[in-house]
Amino acid sequence: MYPIYMCPATAHKAWGTRHPILKYLEEEMAEQDGPLHMYVPGDIIIGGLFPVHLQTNRTTMPGNAHCMRYDVQMFLRSQVMTFAIQEINQRTPKVLPNLTIGYDIYDTCGDVTFAIRATFGLLKDKFNSCFQPGDSNSTVPEPHAKVVIGERYSEVSVAVARILTLSSVAQKILPGDFSVDESKAHDKLEELMGLLRNSTAEAIILFTKGANVDVIMKAAIQNNLSRIWIGSDSWSTSTRIAEIKGIYKVGQVFGFISKRNEVPGFKDYVTSMFQGTTNPFLEQYLSYYPRCNSSEKNSKNNCSLTKSQHGSKQCLDPRCLVNYIDQDESYNIYVAVKVIAEGLRQLLKCDSEKCGRNATFTALELFQEIKKVNFTVDTTHIFFDDNGDPSIGYDIVNWDMTESKVDIKTIGEYWPSGKIKLPDDLISKMCNVTETTMNCSKSCALGHELRKPENGCCKKCVPCHETSFSPGKGVKCEPCRNWEYPSPEKDKCLNKTLDFLKWWDPFAIVLSFFEIVGIVITILVTVLFAVHRNTPIVKAVGGYLSFLELFSLLACFCITFTFTAKPSTASCVAGLPLFGILFTLCISCILANLLQILVCFRFDQRKSAWLKRLNRPVAVVAVIFCAQLILCVLWLYYRPPIPKEVYHAKTILLQCEKGSKEFFGVMLGYNALLAFACFLFAFHGKLLPDLYKNASFITISMLLYLVIWIVFIPIYISMVGKYTRAIEAAAVLVSNYSILCCHLAPKCYIMLFRKEINSEQAITEYIRKHCEQKGIAVVKS
């Protein structure tokens, strides 16, 4: 129902002079074009506020305001009020014998200022003294309008209620709506669209006036915003909004409107051109839409209205005008008038013959009586609950929309008691809906994104790839950078951990221990060899070459430290390439020593001749060493080992990239070839008179070296991770220890614990016995 305002006078004190705020408002409104107004006198006056024009041209700039956007439906609703009052006055038997009801109706133009001005007019008494009582002790004068129907929009109704309260007006407000400040409409609209786009809500309750809905729906179409819209009674049956181009794109529209019913006899009243009556509202309508004369053809078939303004002069047949009579708000107005009449009948104790009291009463008395009405209007039973809500309930409507038309259908009912009635087929249909454009997922959990499948209308929440992340809310998954990985929830990226062989790693600690032990032992062996450098055993090992061999071993032990800690360019270059050069130096010394042994003890003169030509220890060492040196220099020049980052799921492996695998393979192969040559010479030399078993121990050490690197290669190829560098270091250590322990350590044992055989006499005696066993003649000096 329309808002009904009661205007009682109470015993409250009033101002002795006009309030300055009211004076300012009256002066400002006097400068504007006044709203349309129609007045019919009577013993009792009912006020009416209708936005026959939907808005004004009001802006933030000063100047007169004018009404705009004439609405035929609102015009017809104002005529429903006059029709209902006429019906009461002319009814037989009389509802109010000897009394007539008059009306005072204003066009508010949907504007708060115009509505306030109209409210001032309703509050004035017949002496025009609503705000000017005789003295400070008098009460506020009783307004000439005892009750007001309207205004339609809550934005305006609230302002009206505030003004009526100045006169201690008790009020009763029934369902309405709210609107936004049009001066800030653009900013508000942008803000609203942003909120709706980012919202997970599937249904939107749009509780505002039709002018605002018009703007919002057009913006929704432009933003491709599809939702379920639930409308208030101010626009749920609006043909203006239903005719917006592309309205079907906004989704489903449901609405709540007051129970729909026809106003009895009103269609005939309109068709008869209001039974020849006239009033300012009707005169203005005819200025916009004049009657069609008989010469104008097709007037009966042309029932569409243009967006009329002053001077449009569109011809409209009365039989077409009835098409614009709604069955909800018009019927509410009709019922509101009947309720007021019933309240008056009870208050004035009227029967069909007379009334028990005169028309002198306060609006508060009428208000109390209206609260107690309980009667039937036509087929509608009406009463008010404790909250002042009427019992007539609401219809639930649905917009059945296609590209070509919109059909507004009633699909159910809602009653103030909370009871909802919907058709069973609709309930069943909605319960079985699993996927629509409205109930699509609009947000996702952390680590998921909205992605539309090939088949289907809905985007679905899909987990991000194992290397991507999403903060949720359907945001697209983005890949983490190379040095990052997604968190367990995949809502953010975390920095990967640098992975390399650290000093405190157990494997590194073990390697460091053996490196230090190797360095210490090598130094001790070097000192021992230096002390016994003139003894036969040192000469048998190679003499001065043994010191070069010890130096290369010491350097190899030191190099193994570069395999631990964070790889750098220096540590990568000082690793395997430098080891290859130094270990070649060590093996070349051993090979030169073996050649000396073979030359000294080769008794076959034919074969020893070519060996004597090779018995150039310095030359042999220099040639073999330089060949490896050149090879490694070329390696370091063209494609040297460099630090490399290998990205894994949660770690960044820091290792040394070999650079040229070909040079690396040739380096290892060259050392393996030298070791194999040493192995062959040493194995052959086992048959010679070697008191210190030098050839035998070299055979064992070279065999260990070859086995270690043969085992290392497949492990190195298959192994991935920080311990690859540890395996390299271990291979280098085992190679060093094979020489140190199997070739040099036995000589140290003889120096310390078998000194008796560390003499030329012992060597001579051993050689003599060997020759005697072989049957070789020995020449005694």
Image (tube, helix red, strand yellow):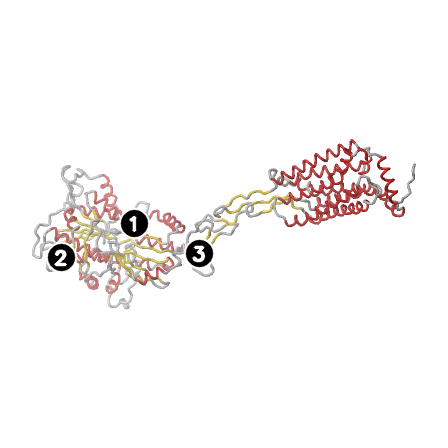
The answer to whether marks 1 and 2 mark residues whose Cβ atoms lie closer than 8 Å is no
Label 3 is placed on what type of residue? Lys
The residues bearing labels 1 and 3 have C-alpha atoms spaced at a distance of 34 Å
Quarter of the C terminus within the rendering: top right
Front residue of 322 and 39 = 322
Left or right: residue 373 versus residue 462 is: left
Front residue of 561 and 37 = 561
**Secondary structure beneath label 2:** helix
Quadrant in the rendering for residue 436: bottom left
- Label whose residue precedes the other's in the sequence (2 or 3): 2
Q: Residues within 10 Å of mark 1 (few under 14, many from 20)?
A: some
Left or right: residue 445 versus residue 645 is: left
Q: Position of residue 37 (x, y in %)?
A: 21, 52
Q: Residues within 10 Å of mark 3 (few under 14, many from 20)?
A: some
**Secondary structure beneath label 1:** loop
For label 3, the residue is: 459
Q: Position of residue 417 (x, y in %)?
A: 24, 54
Q: Which is closer to the viewer, label 2 or label 3?
A: 3
Label 1 is placed on what type of residue? Phe
Q: Which mark is residue 178?
A: 1
Q: Which mark is residue 89?
A: 2
The answer to whether marks 1 and 3 mark residues whose Cβ atoms lie closer than 8 Å is no
Q: Residues within 10 Å of mark 2 (few under 14, many from 20)?
A: many
- Label whose residue precedes the other's in the sequence (1 or 3): 1
Label 2 is placed on what type of residue? Asn
Residue shown at the point (8%, 53%) measured from the top left: 355
The residues bearing labels 2 and 3 have C-alpha atoms spaced at a distance of 63 Å
The residues bearing labels 1 and 2 have C-alpha atoms spaced at a distance of 35 Å
